Amino acid sequence: MFINIIKSYRDIVAVCDSSILGKRFEEGKFQLDVKESFYRGEEVSEEKAIKIMKDMAAEDATFNIAGEESVNAALKAGIITKESVGEIQGIPFALVLL
């Protein structure tokens, strides 16, 4: 999976599965655009992604998470719950403002 930390007033952590990078999903009036310019960062293992997400949550970051592997890693990191996960065209995603 890819993880990209965008430095800002409040850091933004973009996480996505490698297999959906650069793809766009639409369902009704909703769309999920997994843009390379936003999500492409360091390619990491699930273990490293979980550590980064936990560390960034402690720093009050916001998160954009897309894809099954990435959402599962965020669940394991404890930054999201199953109830906070949405789905567009079968692709799970979550947005987190801690």
Image (cartoon, rainbow, N blue to C red):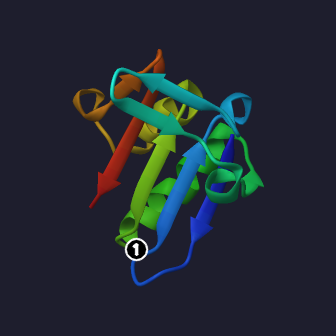
Q: Residues within 10 Å of mark 1 (few under 14, many from 20)?
A: few
Residue 69 lies in quadrant: top right
* Label 1 sits on residue: 59
Q: Quadrant of the N terminus?
A: top right
Residue located at (32% from left, 52% from top)? 96
**Image spot of residue 38 (x, y percent):** 62, 57
Judge by depth and name the residue closer to the eye, 23 or 43. Answer: 23
Query: At x 69% / y 38%, what residue is drawn?
Result: 21
| Total numbered labels | 1
Left or right side of 67 for 85? left
Question: Is residue 58 depicted above or below 2 in this figure?
Answer: below
The secondary element bearing badge 1 is classed as loop
Q: Quadrant of residue 60?
A: bottom left
Extreme residue in the top direction: 90
Residue 74 image point, x, y percent: 45, 41
- Spot the residue most to the front: 29
- The amino acid type found where label 1 is placed reads Glu
Residue nearest the viewer, comparing 61 with 88 = 88
Compared to residue 54, the image places residue 25 above or below, namely above
Q: Residue furthest left?
A: 83
Residue 62 seen from this side:
yes
Quadrant location of the C terminus? bottom left
Q: Could you say where residue 31 lies in the image, as x and y percent from the top left?
A: 44, 33
| Drawn side of residue 12 relative to residue 81, left or right | right
Can you give x and y, in whole percent of width and height, for residue 14 in the image?
A: 54, 54
At horizontal 63% and vertical 42% (from top left) the residue drawn is 47
**Residue lying at the far right of the rendered structure:** 43
Q: Is residue 22 above or below residue 30?
A: below
The answer to whether residue 75 is seen in the rendering is: no
Residue 57 falls in image quadrant: bottom left
